[in-house]
């Protein structure tokens, strides 16, 4: 059997925050959580899933995670229940800017989108890109976690949405047979940003639509 997905996840990447950084695996319960930045990952993983035990993430135990990623095959991965929580790329990008860059003085969102995110001139430079796709945790594509470059999707069993997180979380708990712990949202109170649509103009809408086209397509999001 061809190991299309597992070889993709094993690729050596010379840029920060690679795909492995966004994988949380539970080999005992056969669960995989794809954890894109700015999609309630702290609330879901650190405060609920991880305390239940048996989870492995690269940032906490690189040796143990490295052994798992080295040995896993596509056939074995098919035995896992895999899930992801995603977010509208337009609101996700505003949230990422608001929490990570706005406090550092990057106060112009449109300039940030045009000059930093899509040209790599500001936020950690070109190391944050691979083939013109953002790789930094908070800006990487969500679709890039669950499909290989040719568009083939892995064995994704459940897609939850941040916009419907309470209901989707309750449904997921039922599916993977864990106690339903109500979601407690971790919020950054330094800056409230209101409606994300207020930060865009036609040019930035087009830029984000193009960069995150696959996110919009496979997770059924749109601007309006």
Image (cartoon, rainbow, N blue to C red):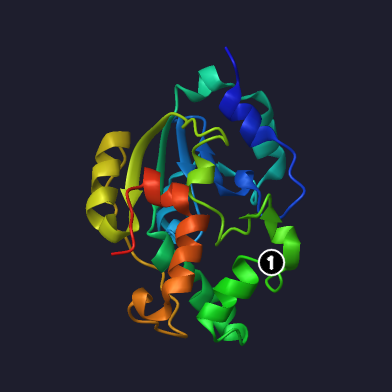
**Measuring 62% from the left and 43% from the top, which residue is drawn there?**
20
Which quadrant of the figure contains the N terminus?
A: top right
Whole-percent x and y of residue 90?
Answer: 41, 65
Whole-percent x and y of residue 100?
Answer: 57, 74
**Measuring 42% from the left and 77% from the top, which residue is drawn there?**
201
Q: Residue furthest top?
A: 1
Near-viewer residue (64 or 89): 89
In the image, residue 54 above or below residue 141 = above
Whole-percent x and y of residue 109?
Answer: 52, 80
In the image, residue 154 above or below residue 44 = above
**Measuring 46% from the left and 51% from the top, which residue is drawn there?**
213
Q: Secondary structure at mark 1?
A: loop
Residue behind mark 1: 120
Residue 43 image-quadrant placement: bottom left
Count numbered badges in the picture: 1
Q: Is residue 142 visible?
A: yes
**Measuring 34% from the left and 38% from the top, which residue is drawn there?**
158
Near-viewer residue (37 or 180): 37
């Amino acid at each position: 059997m061809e190991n299309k997905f597992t070889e993709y996840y094993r690729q050596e990447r010379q840029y920060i925050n690679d795909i492995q950084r966004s994988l949380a695996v539970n080999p005992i319960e056969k669960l995989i959580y794809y954890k894109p930045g700015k999609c309630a990952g702290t609330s879901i993983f650190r405060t609920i899933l991880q305390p239940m035990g048996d989870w492995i993430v690269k940032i906490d135990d690189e040796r143990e995670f490295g052994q798992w990623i080295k040995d896993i095959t596509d056939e074995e991965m098919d035995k896992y229940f895999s899930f992801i929580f995603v977010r509208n790329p337009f609101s996700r990008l505003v949230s990422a800017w608001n929490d990570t860059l706005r406090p550092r003085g990057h106060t112009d969102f449109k300039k940030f989108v045009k000059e930093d995110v899509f040209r790599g001139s500001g936020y950690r430079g070109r190391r944050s890109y691979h083939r013109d796709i953002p790789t930094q945790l908070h800006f990487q594509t969500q679709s890039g976690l669950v499909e290989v470059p040719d568009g083939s999707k892995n064995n994704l069993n459940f897609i939850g949405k941040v916009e419907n997180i309470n209901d989707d979380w309750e449904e997921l708990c039922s599916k993977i047979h864990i106690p339903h712990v109500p979601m407690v949202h971790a919020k950054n109170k330094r800056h409230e940003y209101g409606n994300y649509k207020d930060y865009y103009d036609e040019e930035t809408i087009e830029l984000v639509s193009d960069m995150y086209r696959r996110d919009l397509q496979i997770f059924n999001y749109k601007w309006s």
